[in-house]
Image: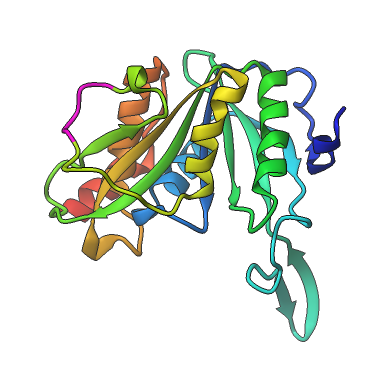
């Protein structure tokens, strides 16, 4: 155990989990159409899963900006939900284990928090990591969403539309992890799904469907689409 292990709270599947692929999405920065959130929710809903670990957020969050949620029933406080960041193991239809990491981006201590994540990834044998997100784009909802990839390693990128110039942007925590995963020899990529700008603040099921299909093809996974297909068809209509 190292000093970074103070962030890690082992779950039931912590000791016996091995998985080569990590899919992750953090809320709080870039995720138009809730693409990352919808993908992870769909996979957890449709596939067997077990908690591998939780990451303690007390030292990395501003609680005044990310306040706990309290349930009140007939003036009685019955529940309080703290901001969370969890790592879960799912098993796809072919029996392959995949790790899902989701939660709020940390406000501070990004370096220490990322090193704690890397510790767990090394223990689990992670070789590939994919950051999931949507971006607002000038496209109609009747068009198949475009998917592009980013990576600090150009040899991991597939043939895709060339960027019109160079962009300098403020990084999300997911993109920050992409840049640093090479510290532990993990091949990191970002999956970017185009979302019509007028639907960016809600959920965009067609984008999540396209992303899951893309992940299945590129990572050799057998992932279910479930109710997202029906939701996608309904939105297109």
Is 148 placed left or right of 80 in the picture? left
**Residue 92 shows up from this direction:** yes
In this view, the residue farthest toward the bottom is 75
In the rendered view of the protein, which quadrant contains the N terminus? top right
Q: Nearer the viewer, residue 52 or 109?
A: 109
Report how many numbered discs are placed on residues in the image: 0
Q: Looking at the image, is 112 positioned above or below residue 47?
A: below
Q: Picture coordinates of residue 177 (x, y %)?
A: 54, 37
Apparent side of residue 188 relative to residue 215 in the rendered image (left or right): right
Q: Position of residue 234 (x, y in %)?
A: 22, 52
Residue 102: x percent and y percent? Answer: 58, 44
Task: Tell me the quarter of the picture where residue 154 sits.
Answer: top left
Asked whether residue 230 is in view, the answer is: no
Seen in the picture, residue 87 relative to 223 is either above or below; the reply is: below
Magenta stretch, residue numbers:
158-162
- The picture quadrant where one finds residue 208 is top left
Name the residue nearer the viewer: 223 or 87.
87
Q: Residue at x 52, y 54 (%)?
A: 27
Q: Position of residue 85 (x, y in %)?
A: 66, 47
Relative placement, left or right, of 168 versus 181 is left
Residue at 12% in and 46% down: 143
Say if the magenta span includes residue 32.
no
């Amino acid at each position: 155990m190292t000093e970074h292990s103070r962030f890690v709270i082992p779950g039931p599947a912590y000791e016996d989990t091995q998985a080569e692929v990590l899919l992750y999405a953090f809320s709080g920065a870039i995720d138009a159409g809730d693409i990352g959130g919808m993908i992870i929710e769909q996979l957890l809903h449709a596939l067997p899963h077990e908690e591998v670990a939780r990451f303690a957020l007390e030292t990395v969050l501003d609680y005044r900006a990310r306040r706990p949620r309290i349930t009140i029933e007939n003036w009685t406080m019955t529940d309080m939900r703290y901001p969370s960041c969890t790592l879960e193991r799912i098993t796809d239809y072919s029996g392959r284990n995949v790790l899902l990491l989701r939660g709020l981006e940390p406000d501070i201590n990004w370096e220490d928090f990322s090193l704690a994540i890397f510790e767990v990834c090394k223990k689990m044998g992670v070789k590939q990591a994919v950051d999931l997100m949507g971006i607002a784009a000038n496209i109609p909802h009747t068009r198949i969403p475009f998917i592009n990839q980013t990576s600090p390693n150009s040899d991991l990128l597939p043939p895709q539309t060339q960027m019109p110039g160079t962009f300098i942007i403020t990084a999300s925590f997911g993109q920050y992890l992409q840049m640093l995963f090479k510290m532990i020899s993990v091949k990191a990529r970002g999956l970017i799904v185009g979302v019509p700008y007028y639907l960016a603040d809600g959920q965009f099921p067609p984008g999540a469907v396209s992303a899951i299909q893309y992940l299945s093809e590129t990572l050799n996974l057998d992932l279910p689409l479930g109710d997202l297909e029906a939701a996608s068809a309904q939105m297109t209509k």
